[in-house]
Image (cartoon, rainbow, N blue to C red):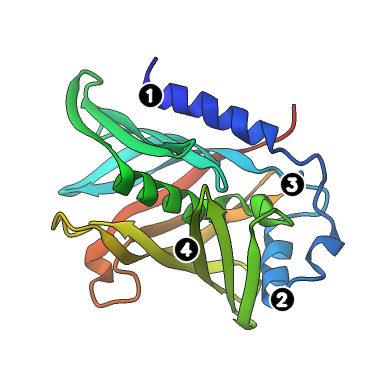
Amino acid sequence: MDPGTEAWQELERRARADADRRTFEADDTTALPPAAARYLDAAIAPGTALAPAARLEMRGRIKIGRWLPFRARQLLAPSHGTVWIATVGGIIRGNDRYVAGAGGMVWKLLGLVPLVRAEGSDVSRSAAERAAGESIWVPTALVAHRGVTWSASTDDQVDVRLDVDGHPVTLHQTLDADGRLRQSHFLRWGDPDRTGAWAEHPFGVEITGHRTFDGLTVPNTGRAGWHFGTDRWDAGVFFEFEITGYELLTSP
C-alpha cells in the first residue's frame, strides 16, 4: 500500500477513536483568557461538533527552487498528526506525513521516478511540530482538549500550547479586531538553509483571508515559511495556500 494512503487510514482511525461527541457551547470558553475566548468564539459557531480532526482540500504555490502550483488534500488531527497528499507542477506526486510517532515524505516524478524519500528522528520531530502549527485549521481540537493550555498577554496576543506525541509546541498568535487570526508563529525543528545541522528556527504564517465551512471560520488564504519575524522572512516563505474544501471528521 502507498505510505500516504496507509498513514491516512491510520490517522483517521486514531482521530475517530479520540472524537468528542460534544458540541461547542458558550460556556466552553468562560474559563479561558479573554483573548483566547475571543479567538475560539470567532472561529467556532455554537453547536459545532468538537471534532479532533478535519479533511481539507487546497491549492496554491510551493517553492521548490522555483514556484510551482499545487493541489492537495490533507487529513489533519493536530494532537495526533497529519497527512498531506499533493500533486505539484502537474507531474510531481507524493506526501508528507506524521502518524503514530513517525514522520516521513515520499515524492516521485509522474508517480514513478523517485525524487525525495526522507524519514528519521529529525523529519519526525519537524512533521509533528507542523501538525501542531496547523491547528489553526482545526480550532475545535483546541477546546477543552487534554494537553492544551492557553495564555494571553494582551487583547490581541494569545499563546496556545499543545503536545503531539511528546513534542510540545507553543503557538504565538496575533488576532484582528474581530478575534480572527492574523499571524501565527512558533519554533520548529528543521534545516531550512540545508546546512546538514537541524535546530529550532522561527516558522510562521501570515493570514490574508478567512472562510466559513460547516460552522467553522478558518484561515483560507495566506503564506507560510521559515525565518518568521526576521529580515529573512520574505526569502523564507515557500508556501502560499487557498483552502477550497473542508470537512470536520466527527464521530461515526
- At 23% from the left edge and 56% from the top edge, which residue is drawn? 191
Within-10-Å neighbours for mark 3: few <14, some 14–19, many 20+: many
Assign a secondary structure to mark 1.
helix
Type of the residue with mark 1:
Pro
The Cα atoms of the two marked residues, 2 and 1, are separated by 41 Å
Say which of marks 4 and 1 sits in front: 1
Q: Pointer 1: what residue? A: 3
* Figure disc tally: 4
Q: Position of residue 192 (x, y in %)?
A: 23, 58
Q: Secondary structure under badge 2?
A: loop
What residue did someone put label 2 on?
A: 33
Three-letter code, disc 3: Leu
| Whole-number angstrom distance, CA of label 3 to CA of label 2 | 20 Å
In the rendered structure, which disc, 3 or 1, sits on the residue that comes first in sequence?
1
Q: Considering only vertical position in the picture, is 63 above or below 38?
A: above
What's the distance in space between the residues labelled 4 and 3, CA to CA? Answer: 23 Å
The N terminus is located in which quarter? Answer: top left
Mark 3 in CB contact with mark 1 (< 8 angstroms) = no
**Type of amino acid at the residue the image marks with label 4:** Ile
| 24 lies left or right of 113 | right
In the rendered structure, find residue 50 and report the number of the disc placed on it: 3
- Quarter of the image where the C terminus is located: top right
The residue mark sitting in front, 2 or 4, is: 2
Label whose residue precedes the other's in the sequence (4 or 3): 3
Q: Are marks 2 and 1 in contact (CB under 8 Å)?
A: no
> Residue 51, which numbered label?
none
Mark 2 vs 1, N-terminal side = 1
Question: Residue 117 at x, y = what percent?
Answer: 23, 32
State the residue position of label 4.
207
